[in-house]
């Protein structure tokens, strides 16, 4: 038999590509062999040995009713688990579902749970993202500039739990490596599911129309998602009823690096705080999900942003009502998820109870909103009014649910009296039958003059009468002893058995009817899924607006003016996260079309990074519709926020090499445009001084002349500050310090003009580097400055060619670049060395060899 079972297990394993198989054997789901070992290790489950015919198999099992929590735990660890149920005949088992990270409905996790498919065509990439727990399903096509990076950025923005790469992308090493680098499970779904014909068919079947079909690459991704969910889930697809096609350009481009640098969702260090965690005062998990989505997808839609601002303003100004709303929201359940579970038939009574409670607080929420200025008919209040009316009947229906229903659905206790005639009759019948036992102990006691009689019921004995041992002589003929205990004896009788049968019959009929009524309720909730989802989204929006209003009121934030003009003007701005932990010194910032690039200088730790991030965060907050940490602000809407922190300044460390730094710089120079905000923090620092300075120099010119983006560039290359002389739309600011020598006080105020000097050597001095070394580095620095010059280029329309002599601090004009090289021909020996440098294959040369090469070059140059 065991061999037979393990044999069957093996053959089912061959049918599925899941990692683990749970197979029902009677009252248990069993894992065998290596699966048992894995499950045992992962879940700390006892593994026993199943011995049979001379061989022995590890075996681990969980009770049938307990499978869900184990499934969840395994799936959360990234496994895909196939579940095989036993049919009526004991030997016919088949796989009924595959639980995977992206298709699990039973999640407790409040975060979104995106399953994302990505595909490639010749000229475009497609992405489809579906959260089966809420029924959200959206798809987009990515083509044009830098598509791979934008695809990956769009992918990561969804924080997927499972990714389905299309067949073509599986051969792409860059993309494969990037996918492996996410927290998501990468699943290689059947390639055919990505084929255009099949995808089109799948989508048409699912949505019943071809009018929604997106472009080819996106359609193939969406088709694969639906195909995959259909294959793995029971009923899961029923909740996926809408497919939204969007363009990534609808949102502000915020790439992965920027999301990380600005610590939007996750802090960079363990003891840090993310913007999300600071802003989050939401009461519901749907609200939290939405806030996080707003932060990852800031909007460029002025009308939408103003609507959000209006709501936040109204809520910020009316604290009493706001607090009342938050209390009501606290009682609201996750309607989007509840609706989905109802549709797929997996909602239990508690889920429906959550729906009822949420619908019950709606009138109070509405009333509060109606009592408020400015949150009236057109915004959230209006939406709520429309949806609440259609949900009113449903709430009445749900009154049929008891107040404290059990988790199980077939054991009764779900439905109240008075909602179903047939059930009421069955309840009467059941209660009459149970009544017999209620007074039985007392009746028997009196009839036979016992001192003590107990009547009770348990699983093995059913109903019984229990008499103390000392009185068993007085027991009547009709009593049938069934069990002897230490001090007592248990009996049943024919009369007892007769009544017991009636209790069982009526109980079963009652439970069955309760289950039927429950299923009808669940269906009613499922039928209202669309309304409930929209309602859930409205409540989530209200929750987020309350949260942002709460934060704005508590921290004295202001409503920014959002405009299409190219301007970023912040009065007394603060950093939203840093202001939580220190006495913050506010700063001003002003950028416009004629002043679009600022070089930020100042000593280490003076506040340069903070100042620039603050500008990026204020812009981002304005574009989620939030108030901002400032006394006043005017924010011109941007199409992208790009940040790069130099390799040496990347506090997360390790990940960032100079190569990464440069490829990200390249991305920014390619992607940013006139309407973008660029923040460069110590870029160029990851390499030797002259390399670094040259790259920083050239990047600054390019951003100023070609890209035209609003740019903040913090640099410790003091030399760069002279650039502003020739770049008409660039300016210097510095973070002020007071004092000199060992005694520098950080003032944290940002002032016009460059810092008065470079502080590198000064910092070395402060840090206690021995005086001879400090002195020597000063003289080396001076020598270097005398020796070297850097060329600067003006705007393309007014090309100025000049050589800046760092020693004299002045420009020497040149006619043009060509004559420059004719004037100063490179000596042949230098040229030879340069050629050799160019030819060295860095990857194929050991560091030692490089060292000796450099030594050799230096010798020749001298
Ligand atoms: P830099 O980039 O110049 O090295 P940072 O921006 O990292 O300096 O700032 C260093 C520290 O100074 C920050 O961690 C912060 O605590 C503090 N700080 C920065 N700006 C301010 C400010 N405006 N008000 C108060 N503290 C500030
Ligand atoms: Mg810094």
Image (spheres, rainbow, N blue to C red):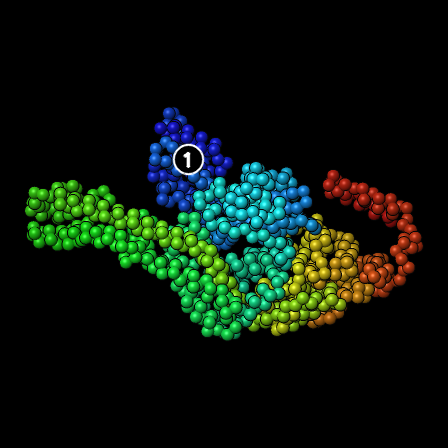
Work out whether 795 lies above or below 440: below
Work out whether 327 lies above or below 432: below
**Residue 632 shown left or right of residue 337 in the figure:** right
Along the line of sight, the residue nearer the viewer: 597 or 416? 416
Identify the residue shown where x is 62% and y is 51%.
153
**Residue 357 shown left or right of residue 578 in the figure:** left
Quadrant in the rendering for residue 272: bottom right
Q: Position of residue 832 (x, y in %)?
A: 87, 44
Work out whether 417 lies above or below 548: above
Instruction: Identify the secondary structure beneath mark 1.
Output: strand
Along the line of sight, the residue nearer the viewer: 459 or 369? 369
Q: Which residue lies furthest to the right in this view?
A: 823
Q: Please indicate, yes or no, whether residue 180 appears anywhere in the rendered image.
A: no
Identify the residue shown where x is 29% and y is 47%.
512
Q: Position of residue 267 (x, y in %)?
A: 57, 57
Identify the residue shown where x is 48% and y is 53%.
134
Q: Where is residue 442 in the image (x, y as percent from the top left)?
A: 12, 54
Along the line of sight, the residue nearer the viewer: 343 or 52? 343
The residue carrying pointer 1 sits among few (fewer than 14), some (14 to 19) or many (20 or more) residues within 10 Å by Cα, namely some
Check disc 1 and report the residue beneath it: 94
Quadrant in the rendering for residue 93: top left
């Amino acid at each position: 038999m065991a061999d037979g079972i393990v044999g069957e297990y093996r053959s089912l394993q061959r049918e599925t590509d899941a990692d683990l198989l749970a197979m029902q054997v009677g009252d248990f789901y069993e894992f065998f062999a290596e699966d048992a070992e894995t499950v045992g290790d992962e879940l700390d489950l006892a593994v026993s040995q199943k011995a049979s015919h001379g061989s022995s198999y590890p075996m681990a099992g969980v009770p049938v009713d307990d499978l869900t929590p184990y499934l969840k735990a395994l799936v959360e660890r990234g496994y895909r688990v196939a579940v095989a149920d036993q049919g009526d005949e004991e030997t016919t088992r088949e796989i009924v579902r595959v639980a995977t990270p992206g298709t699990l409905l039973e999640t407790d996790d409040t975060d979104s749970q995106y399953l994302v498919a990505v595909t490639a065509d010749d000229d475009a990439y497609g992405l489809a993202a579906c959260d089966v727990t809420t029924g959200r399903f959206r798809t987009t096509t990515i083509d044009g500039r830098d598509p791979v990076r934008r695809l990956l950025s769009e992918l990561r923005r969804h924080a997927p739990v499972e990714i389905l790469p299309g067949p073509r992308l599986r051969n792409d090493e860059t993309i494969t490596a990037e996918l492996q680098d996410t927290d998501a499970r990468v699943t290689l779904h059947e390639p055919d599911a990505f084929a255009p014909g099949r995808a089109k068919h799948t989508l048409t079947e699912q949505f019943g129309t071809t009018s929604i079909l997106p472009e080819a690459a996106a359609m193939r991704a969406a088709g694969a998602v639906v195909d995959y969910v259909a294959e793995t889930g029971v009923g899961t697809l029923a909740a996926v009823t809408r497919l939204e096609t969007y363009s990534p350009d609808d949102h502000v481009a915020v790439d992965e690096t920027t999301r990380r640098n600005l610590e939007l969702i996750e802090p960079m260090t363990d003891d840090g705080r993310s913007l999300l965690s600071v802003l989050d005062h939401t009461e519901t998990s749907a609200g939290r999900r939405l806030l996080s989505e707003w932060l990852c997808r800031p909007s460029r839609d002025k009308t939408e942003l103003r609507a959000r601002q209006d709501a936040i303003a109204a809520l910020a100004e009316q604290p009493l009502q706001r607090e009342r709303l938050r209390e009501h929201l606290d009682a609201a359940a996750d309607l989007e998820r509840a609706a989905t579970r109802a549709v797929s038939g997996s909602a239990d009574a508690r889920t429906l109870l959550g729906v009822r409670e949420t619908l019950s607080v709606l009138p109070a929420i509405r009333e509060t909103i109606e009592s408020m200025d400015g949150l009236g008919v057109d915004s959230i209040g209006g939406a709520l009014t429309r949806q609440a009316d259609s949900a009113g009947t449903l709430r009445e229906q749900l009154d049929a649910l008891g107040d404290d229903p059990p988790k199980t659905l077939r054991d009764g206790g779900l439905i109240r009296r008075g909602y179903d005639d047939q059930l009421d009759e069955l309840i009467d019948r059941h209660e009459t039958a149970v009544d017999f036992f209620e007074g039985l102990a007392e009746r028997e006691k009196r009839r036979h003059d016992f001192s003590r009689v107990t009547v009770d019921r348990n699983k093995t004995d059913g109903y019984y009468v229990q008499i103390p041992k000392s009185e068993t002589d007085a027991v009547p003929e009709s009593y049938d002893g069934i069990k002897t205990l230490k001090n007592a004896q248990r009996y049943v009788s024919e009369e007892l058995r007769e009544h017991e049968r009636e209790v069982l019959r009526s109980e079963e009929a009652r439970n069955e009817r309760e289950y039927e009524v429950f299923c009808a309720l669940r269906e009613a909730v499922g039928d209202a899924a669309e309304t409930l989802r929209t309602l859930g989204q409205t409540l989530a929006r209200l929750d987020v607006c309350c949260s942002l209003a709460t934060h704005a009121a508590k921290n004295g934030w202001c409503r920014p003016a959002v405009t299409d003009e190219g301007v970023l003007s912040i009065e007394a701005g603060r950093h939203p996260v840093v202001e939580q932990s220190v006495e913050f010194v506010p700063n001003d910032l002003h950028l416009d079309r004629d002043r679009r690039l600022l070089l930020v200088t100042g000593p280490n730790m003076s506040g340069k990074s903070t100042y620039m991030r603050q500008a990026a965060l204020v812009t981002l907050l304005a574009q989620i519709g939030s108030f901002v940490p400032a006394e006043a602000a005017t924010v011109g809407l941007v199409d992208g926020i790009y940040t790069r922190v130099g390799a040496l300044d990347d506090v997360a460390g390790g990940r960032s090499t100079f190569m990464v730094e440069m490829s990200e710089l390249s991305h920014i120079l390619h992607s940013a445009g006139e309407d973008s905000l660029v923040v460069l923090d110590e870029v160029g620092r990851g390499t030797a001084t002259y390399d670094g300075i040259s790259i920083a120099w050239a990047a600054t010119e390019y951003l100023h002349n070609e890209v035209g983006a609003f740019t903040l560039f913090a640099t410790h290359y003091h030399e760069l500050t002279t650039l502003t002389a020739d770049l008409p739309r660039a300016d210097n600011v510095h973070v002020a310090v007071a004092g000199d020598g060992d005694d520098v006080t950080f003032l944290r105020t940002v002032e016009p003009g460059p810092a008065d000097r470079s502080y590198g050597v000064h910092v070395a001095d402060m840090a206690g580097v021995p005086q001879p070394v400090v002195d020597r580095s000063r003289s080396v620095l001076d020598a270097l400055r005398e020796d070297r010059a850097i060329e600067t280029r003006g705007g393309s329309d007014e090309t100025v060619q000049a050589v800046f002599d760092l020693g004299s601090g002045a420009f020497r004009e040149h006619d043009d670049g060509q004559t420059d090289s004719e004037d100063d021909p490179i000596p042949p020996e230098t040229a030879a060395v340069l050629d050799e440098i160019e030819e060295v294959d860095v990857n194929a040369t050991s560091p030692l060899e490089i060292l000796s090469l450099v030594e050799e070059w230096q010798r020749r140059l001298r």
